[in-house]
Each structure stands twice: as C-alpha cells, then as structure tokens.
Image: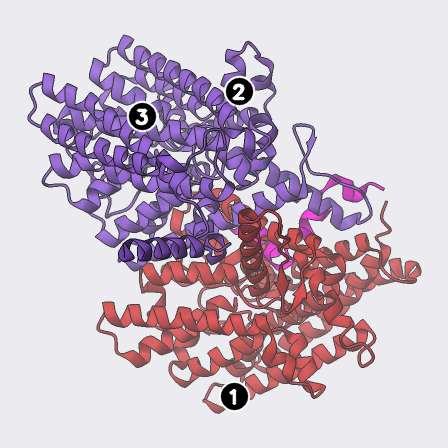
Amino acid sequence: MARGKELTVALARFKCCCMIELRPVGYIIGLLLATLGAMMLFPMALDYFSGDDNWMAFLESSVLTCLIGALLSVSCANSSKRGSGITLRQSFVLTTGTWVMLPLFGALPFIIGMPEATFTNAVFEAVSGMTTTGTTVFSGLDDLPPGVNLWRGILQWLGGLGIVIVALIFLPVMKVGGMQFFRSEGFDTLGKILPRALDISSALIQIYIVLTVACATAYFALGMSGFDAVVHALTTVSTGGFSSSDISFGKFEHSMELVAIVFMLLASLPFIRFVQMSQGNFTPIWRDAQVRAYLRWNAYAALAVTAYEMYHFDRPFLESIRESSFNIVSTFSGTGFASVDLSTWGPFPFVVLIMVGLIGGCTSSTGCSVKVFRYLILFEAIKVQVRRLHSPSAMLDVRYEGRRVGEDVINSVIVFFTLFILTFGVAAVALSLTGLETKTAFTAAWTAVANVGPAFGPEVGPTGAVDGFPAPARWIMIAGMLVGRLELLSVYVLFLARFWRN
Amino acid sequence: MIDIRPVAYVIGRILIVLAILMLAPALVDLGDGLHNGFRIMEAAILTGFIGLCVVLSSKNALRGNLSVKQAYLLTTGIWVLVPAFGALPFWMGEPHLRFSDAYFEAVSGITTTGSTVIYGLDDLPAGMNLWRGMLNWLGGLGIAFIAMIFLPLMRVGGMQFFRTEGFDTFGKELPRAADLAIELARVYTLLTIACILSYGLIGMSALDAIVNGAATIATGGFSPSDISFEKYSGAGEYMGAFYMILGSLPYVRYVQMIKGDARPFWKDEQARAYVRWLAAAIVMVTVWQVAHTDMPWEPAFRQSLFNLTSIMSGTGFFSGSFPGWGSFMLIVAFVIGVIGGCSGSSAGGVSVFRVQVAMAAIRAHLTQITSPNTVATVKYQGRRVENDVLNGLILFFAGYILLLGIFTVGVSLTGVDTVSALFAVWTSMGNIGYGIGPLVLRTGTFIDFPQGAIAIMTVAMLLGRLGLLAILVIVLPSFWRR
C-alpha cells in the first residue's frame, strides 16, 4: 500500500514538471506502429512466395512491431477523450515522435534479416526511406531479397503519405515556416481538427493511391517487370528515390524516364489542388502561383542545362533534353533518381542541380526542401523592402495570389529560410569534421537537409551508396534528414526548455 | 526625375581629390627614374580634368541637403565611377592590363576586397604598389563614412538600428555628421600610422610597411608581394592579425574612446561576439590541423590565427600552407567569411550584428510558436529591435545567400569548376579577397579566371560592399519614377 502511494506521488510530481500530457501522443504513435507492423506482411508474403528465406525476418519484425505498437496504444488509450483532439504542443511531439519512432521499427527487417547491415546502416536506410530522401547505404541492390526492396519502397511511400498529411493538417496550425498562410484552406482551429482531418486524410489517401496505381501501370505497360514497376511507383509518387537497382533508372529504357518525369512532377505539386480536382473544381490548380512558378523554373533549369550540354559536349538535342529534364526534375522534386553519372556533367549543370535542390517542390506535396511558396514570398518581400527604401512613406503590402500576406507569415518565412541555411551550414561543418572531403561534406549536407538523395564526392561509392562514410557522418545525415523533413522548426522547438515547462 | 547635379558635383570633387592623390605614386616612380611615373601623371591629369569639368558644369545646382534618392545615387555612383578612374594607372601604366581587368583591380581595391589579377607584384614599380595600397585605404575610409553616416539614414539592411547610436548618444558632443566624419578620419589615420610603424619595427621595408599598413587597417588585403605575408612569416603574422582585428571593430567605439569613454568599447556585444567566434574558429582549426598532420603547435596556431583573422575581417592576406589545409578548414573559412566583421567598420560580409539579430529573431520566433499568446520581442544590446529593422535585416541575410547562389551559377557558367566558382563569389561578395580553389592555387591570384567570371566578380564586390540594397534600389524602375 505504502509503495503504491509513493508511486502515485512520484507520478503526480512527474506530471507536474512535465506539463505536456504525452498519452494521446503515445496512443497515436502506437496505432501507427501497429499499422507499420501490418505493412511488413506485404514484403513477407513476397519473400515467402518467391522462396526466399528472408520472410522469417519480416514475420519476426512484424510481430514485434505490432506487439509494441498495440501495447503502447492500449496503455495510453484511457486518456484520449473522443473528439477533444490534441493540443498544439502535443502535435509538435507527435510529428517528431512519429518520424523518430517509426524508422526505428522500420529498420527491424534490415537488422534481423541482413546480418551484414549494422544498426547504423539499418536506421539510416529506414530514416532515408521515411523522410523520402532516398540516399542509400546498401550496394548490390539487385541481389537483395525482393522483400527488402519492396520494404524500402513501402517505407518511402508511407513517409510520403505521412508528410502530406502533416503538411496539410498540422503545419498550418503549428505555424511552421509561414504555413499558417494555408490555414483557411485546411483548418481554422485546433478544436475542429479531428473530424475534418479525417475527411481530408481519406481524400488524400485515395488520391495518393490512385497516383501510385497509375504510375505502376504506366511503368508496367512500358515494359518494366511487375516487381520493378511497383517498387519504382512507390518511390516515384513519394518523391523518395529508392531504386531496386544499383544503376537506378540507367537499367531501364528511356521511355521510363518520361513516365517518371510526369509522376515526379505530379507528386511535387500541392496535393490540396488534387483534392479540389477530385471534387470537380479544376480552376485552382491552373491558377496556383506556386504550381506555375514550379513548372516554369523546372523548364528553365532543364533548358539551360540542355543548352550547355549541347554547346559544350556536342550532344544531340533529344538525348540531352531527356537526360537533363529527367535529372533536373528528379532533383527539383527531391526524388533522387539518376539516369547518368551526374558528376560527369560539368560545373554548370552541377551548380544548377544544387540550386534546384535547395528550392524543392511545392508545399503540401511529398516534395522537400525550402519549397517554392517560401521563395515566392521571399522575393515579394525583398521587392517590397527595396521599394520602401526609396519611398518610405508609401504603403506597400506583400501579396501572394492577390491575398495580402500578414507580417507574421513573412516573418516565419524569412526565419525559416535563414534557419534552413544555418542548418545546412552547421551540418556541412559537422560532416567535414568527421573527415569527409569538402565537396562530399557539402553535398551530403545538401542531400540530407533538403531530402534530395544523391551525394557527390570521392567518398561516395560507385553505386551512389554512402556506406563508405564514417559512422558519425551517417548519424549527422540521419539528424539532417529528420530535421529537414519536418520543416526544421517543429523539431527545434522541442529543444527549448520553455516548451516542456508550463 | 531626380536632379542628379548635386550628385555629380560631389563625385566630381572626389575625382579631383583622386587625381591629386595619384600624384604620389607618380612622384615615387619618377623618383625611381621610371618612365611609368609619366603614365600615372597622365592618368592623374585626365582624372583631374574630367573631375573639374563635372564640378563646373553642376556647381550651380548645389543647395541644401541631398534627398534620399540622391543619397542612393551618390553612394552607388561613387563606388562605380571612382574605380573607373582609379583603374587608369593600371591600364595606362606598368602592368598594362586590359581595361576590364584594371577596373576589376580598382574595384577590388576600393571595395577593400583585395582580390588581384596582377601576378608578379614584387617586380611591379613601387608607385603601382603604392597606388594599390592607397585605393584600399581610401575605400576603407569611404565605407566607414558610409556605414556610419549614410546607411543608417538610408535604412539599408537594418542599419537604421544604429541611427540613434551614430548621432543621439553623442548628442551634444558631436552634433553634426561632419564632425563625426572628421573624428573618424582622425582615428583611421592614427590606426594606420600605428600599424605602419609596427610593421617597420619588425623589419619591413618602407614601401612594404606603408602598403601593407594601409591595406591592413582598411581590411583590404592588397599586398606588394605575390606570397603576401609569407614574406614576413613569424612576428609579422601576429602583428598583422592584431591590426586586422582592430580594423574590423566598429569605429564608432574608437571615437568614443578618444572622447575618454572606453566603456562602450568593452561592453559592445558585437565586438565581443566577433572576437569570441573568431577565437572559436581558430582553436578548432588549429586542433584539427595538429591532430591530423604532424605540424607542431606554434606554426599551426600562428597560421590559423593569421589566415582566419584575415578571412573573417575580410582582409585577404594569406600566409604559409594554410590554403591547402583541407576540408574542415575550408568549410569553417566559408562560414566565418560569410559572417564577416562588425558593421560600422570597413570589414565585409553579412556582419556580426546582422547574424546576432537574426539568431535572436529565430529564438523569439521559436518561443512564439510554442506559446502563441506571448509576445516575444527581439532585443539587442538591451534595446528592443523594431519590426521594420528586423525585417530589413533578415531579408538582407536571405538576399545575400540568394545572390551568392545566383552568382555561383553565373561564374560556373563561364566554365570555372564548382569549388573555385563558389569561393570566388564568396570572396567577392564578402569583400574578403582570399583565394581558394584549384583555379586560384597556381598563382594565388584570379588571373586564370575567364573574362565573364571577372565581370561577375566585379559586380559581386560592389553589391557586397554597398549592402546589396543600395545598388538594387537603383535598378528598380520605380526608383526613377516620381
């Protein structure tokens, strides 16, 4: 009895210093883990029917993940009152918690099934999957058990779906990086989150599945094997970039690249517009300033690189425009497929690649990096600021799509951009401290924080695998990928002492 | 729409001064019995004549004060036109550069960058090296004026924060900008003389001491030798580092110090952060180098002290094997080069002040996100930073990074390799002058860069020097409309 009382007191005290009620978060993460465990049954089935012994690994991981997930949600279930939703702080813990916990369990099949994969590599691969980065530490992908390749694809697919939901539902409320601008399109207040969130999420999931099926069908129709078509569709639509082959798209015919371009572009457009389209409203997607700018910039970059290639290397037009547009779109959308060895492209295309990687796709898509929207706001804000300099008394507003952009949105966007650059710089310094070459450290930081995929430099393996990096470098990249994927601020707030106090 | 005559009048006056100053190198070369002296003399006469014509033709318009637009035009005009005449000696005289190269050299001098396209500096006539040092020195003095007196009024990049500081705190003591300017010039001259004497003490020749001294205090970085400070390895490096730091602290503090109040100097948050960050970088790079190579402590420390100070203060001298120290040094150098020295000095880069306020703003923003009901204010040096200052300031940072990217694309388009292109833009926009990259390594100069790259770097130096917006503003069509 006395011990029981002591325990209650201790618990009460713990609740006092940690003012955030974590149980609703645990409940949701538990459910997600159980789902993840269930997803592991797909690769298990594939391995079982193709006669690979590896299916046992998936079964074990699946049971373990489901079990822990169920335990977690059962033990936290009592706290969630129906309809109350979750608070602002809880949603911060939830997003970061999800992206930290799920990859840990997603790494289980690699840990159990592939004795040669270390813990670091397994976690790296899973994080790279869930964040839709696409940097791999495995080489010899073609010889892996098919289930493992399918699992890599599924991880990315889930990660892509997850980030779209987070971007549409949570970020606007969390006011991260100017996303509150899109609040009215998503939700108005926290209270209403759950009912409408469920509506929107189910619409999103439908669209996402339709896109994936269409992509897989297109690949299959043009001659990919069924397995390759599925894996590549999963990683194309999530702008992930994992491939089931070491040479990525170099393995396939050129027509595949065209399919990939179309679907990578679609996947990096704002999904909210697809939701509107499915409701029969086609105007918003054509009017969307972000979509227009994104497509325009893609075209500019691809054309500039094409011109450079034709001029300097005397390449035929069709070949160079196909190659450049595939690789530009792949980098711009943050996918990371490659069809050629990009390091042989010459300095100008290389710098263009780095630049478009730092721009990234549209908001509320599976695309990554700073996002087109923030650049548009930034340009607009700079323009207004410069005008104000010489006519201080004029009333000038920053406008986006005809709407006035509030001071707080502008502030958030600028802070986000600054923080992105700082994070990028810190990651590059840290990576070079582990002994990586300058170019390697720079591009590895770029690929991690912007969730792009390829890294360049002498330490990168011939297949693009980064398993030659020292272990600390791989952990820095893991951190970079997570922070970059969750739009920086939603992770950084967790490090404020204030956040955990009342 | 804008009355440009007052602007032209001031620029004309400056050109006349420039012409008079050109006589100094001319006399030096004539004293050495070199024919080159006559060439410089010709350049001086040309400059003086054009300056005089401009002054006479626009004299009648001078009345009252300059408007804001005129002030923009004036600053930009000075930094674009004066180098065009400052370039004349390089073009007409000894190295006989192409005009684009000569203009690059003069812009690099006036913006206190210190990148050079002249190889074989040791064999150059003494007058030419003196002229390079003088360009650096004048540019440094000019930008300290502008940064203290003009930019706060023009509200460029959050500089209006210093507006009150420049005038109000002095209040009764220094009521007018002209007084402040005189004090500033006095401090600057004193520092230069001290630096030249110190260099003389450690055994530099008279010419070397004068050119290096002028280039050090201006945080310019033109050296009369191809091997820069490697020529005075040892005591010279310590001495150089000391004066480079002095040259990149806010000048307003020196003025206050002369007035007998040293406290603001020690309490200045910007100066303290600058020294702290620099020290951190030096320690890290030294430890890394000692751990990874068999270099002894003393030269490792000395070289990283000298070179990193040179980079962060935007000077651009180099010494020893430092440019080849490898990846970690390169990235640290890149970061501190972007940060740069203190605002209100002749140093370049984003400036410590802006980085500090940007970080404070980020902290405030994070607090705001977690507790939306609190009002988080950004404070700097105990004072609240207003919203408009804050926006201008962080936008400056964002614009800086964007331009860095765009120029790198441009330079790499001319066929320069990626690392050289990135660092060439870095060195130009930050007015650093330190050469890094395969293309620079052969000579330590920018002589191997194609013409297109040189042109882009010239533009980048000017933009970096005038706080970006001062020039961008003039490009806007609305500037010229009523």
Chain containing mark 2: A
The amino acid sitting under disc 3 is Thr
> What residue sits right under mark 2 in the picture?
A273
Percent x, y of residue A358:
45, 40
Chain for colour purple: A
Q: Which residue is at the front of the view, B29 or A357?
A: A357
Q: Are the two marked residues, 2 and 1, in contact with CB atoms closer than 8 angstroms?
A: no
Is the stretch drawn in magenta largely helix, strand or loop?
helix
The amino acid sitting under disc 2 is Arg
Q: Residue placed at 33% from the left, 51% from the top?
A: A441
Highlighted range, magenta: B454-482
The amino acid sitting under disc 1 is Ser
Identity of the residue furthest to the front in this view: A1
Tell whether position B464 is magenta: yes
Mark 3 Cα within 10 Å, few/some/many (few <14, many 20+)? Answer: many
Chain containing mark 1: B
Judge depth for marks 2 and 1 and give the one in front. Answer: 2
The reply to whether residue A450 is visible in this rendering is: no
The quadrant where residue A183 appears: top right
> What residue sits right under mark 1 in the picture?
B198
Judge depth for marks 3 and 2 and give the one in front. Answer: 2
> What residue sits right under mark 3 in the picture?
A235
Real-space CA distance between mark 3 and mark 2, rounded to the nearest whole angstrom: 21 Å
Q: Which residue is at the front of the view, B445 or A164?
A: A164
Q: Are the two marked residues, 1 and 3, in contact with CB atoms closer than 8 angstroms?
A: no
Percent x, y of residue B184:
70, 77
Q: Quadrant of the N terminus of chain B?
A: top right
The quadrant where residue B254 appears: bottom right
Chain for colour red: B
